Amino acid sequence: MNKILYLSKDDYSPHYIIYFLGLKIKIRKKITSNDKNLYIDYVLNHQQDKTKYVEITKESHNISENNPKLIALYLPQYHDFPENVKWFGRGFSEWTNTSKTVPQFVGHYQPHIPIDVGYYNLESNNVMIRQIELAKKYGISGFGFYYYWYSGDKIMEKPIERFLADKSLNINFFLFWANEDWTMLWDNGDAAEVLHKQEIKENDAEKFMTDLLPYLKDERYIKINNKPLFVLYDPELYPYDTYINFNKKIRAIAKENGFDDLYIITTTWRADNYKNNYKEFTDKYLLDGLFEFFPQSLHKVTKKIYPRVVNKKFVGEIFDVHDYIARRQYLYQCNTNLFKGIFPNWDNTPRKCYNHAFIWQNNPQDYKVWLKDILNWTKDNKSKEEQYIFINAWNEWAEGAHLEPDKKYGYAYLQATKEALEEYKNG
């Protein structure tokens, strides 16, 4: 007799599994009228749910040098620049993606609607003034600005250049070189369609440091033992010898300009092949350490969940971040210099709804548990000069990863950040 088995016990699996003549056949369940009615009610009414909304705090956090420092990654994309106009059309920004997003299933929190600073334009420094005020109010010590540099060509650099020129924007920072090809994935397209190729050419080390040094010499730039902190997204994108020569040259130029060296770290996701010996990876690529750029690689260790997705054209996977946090899977030993990372949420359906989206729907309470744990880990495992934690992100709105307040949660994630800093030693 053939048996029909469900993938889950709660009937939320989107498929039947049928065993027939020794073959395993997966058949998608039909969407019922009840499914559709529940979905329509959710889409029409979930924005009215204010039960999880948290108002702005009346008491600012006093950032202490004795606490690990929280650095939020910062996307400078929200302004008009020639490449966006050329590739995606006039007026395009991340707000274009976020505003068009709809839920794919009942309980799917979309769209994310910003409040406080709102749908901002980074043409004005007034936006950063308020962002910095909010960040410091809740205990964020600095921003990690994404830096887009293509053999001398810079993209999205204007907001960072204005930040550098305006010393009243008083928050610490570092640069995170997003050294990958720019592809159509930015707007739900194909990663194979390269818009701007990433490569290292002759004399690029000198050109790169000419552009970088004004930032590195700024008094707000984060330095560890007189070594400017610099994040490189992926050293494996280049031929090995080309990368090693580049690494050595930019370090030498930093020393020629009064620094002890550069403090270069990269993300753990490419190092997964070395998971049992991360030190081999950092040594091979002349790195000072790694940081957890979550949710990169998180799909390998978190369980999938199966809500009834109504949109038949949706392409993506949904994961259980609550289980990951409950089992403290982020607490592990590493044989190289590791910096912990965390994210408030992750949902890149605004960019990739039809091109393999990943969804981890978190909540402020679980996020706070996670953050408290890694604050304690950092305090116990890192030297005082190296006590940094990286939050992904301050404002990645099209990937659902933002500490900036929104219509559903208000200031809840910022409040959870503040409380974690104030409670972690007793946690």
Image: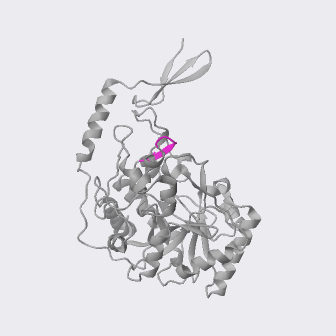
Which residue corresponds to the image point at 32% horizontal and 29% vertical from the top-left? Answer: 36
Q: Is residue 317 above or below residue 82?
A: above
Locate residue 147: give its quadrant: bottom right
How is colour applied across the structure in the image?
one colour
> Which range of residues does the magenta coloring cover?
353-360
Locate residue 93: give its quadrant: bottom left
Left or right of residue 420: residue 315: right
Residue 315 visible at all:
yes
Front residue of this view, candidates 410 and 62: 410
Residue 88, image x, y percentages:
48, 53
Q: Is residue 102 above or below residue 151?
A: above
Residue 72, image x, y percentages:
44, 66
Residue 172 visible at all:
no
Which residue corresponds to the image point at 51% horizontal and 57% vertical from the top-left? Answer: 86
Front residue of this view, candidates 354 and 378: 354
Inspect the magenta stretch and tell me whether residue 396 lies in it: no
Q: Residue furthest bottom?
A: 258
Residue 144, image x, y percentages:
48, 69
Which residue corresponds to the image point at 54% horizontal and 60% vertical from the top-left? Answer: 292
**Quadrant showing the N terminus:** top right
Inspect the magenta stretch and tell me whether residue 354 lies in it: yes
Q: Is residue 383 above or below residue 338?
A: below
Left or right of residue 237: residue 80: left
Q: How many marks?
A: 0
Front residue of this view, candidates 5 and 206: 206
Q: Residue furthest top?
A: 1
Residue 197, image x, y percentages:
64, 58
**Quadrant showing the C terminus:** bottom left
Locate residue 271: give its quadrant: bottom right
Left or right of residue 12: residue 179: right
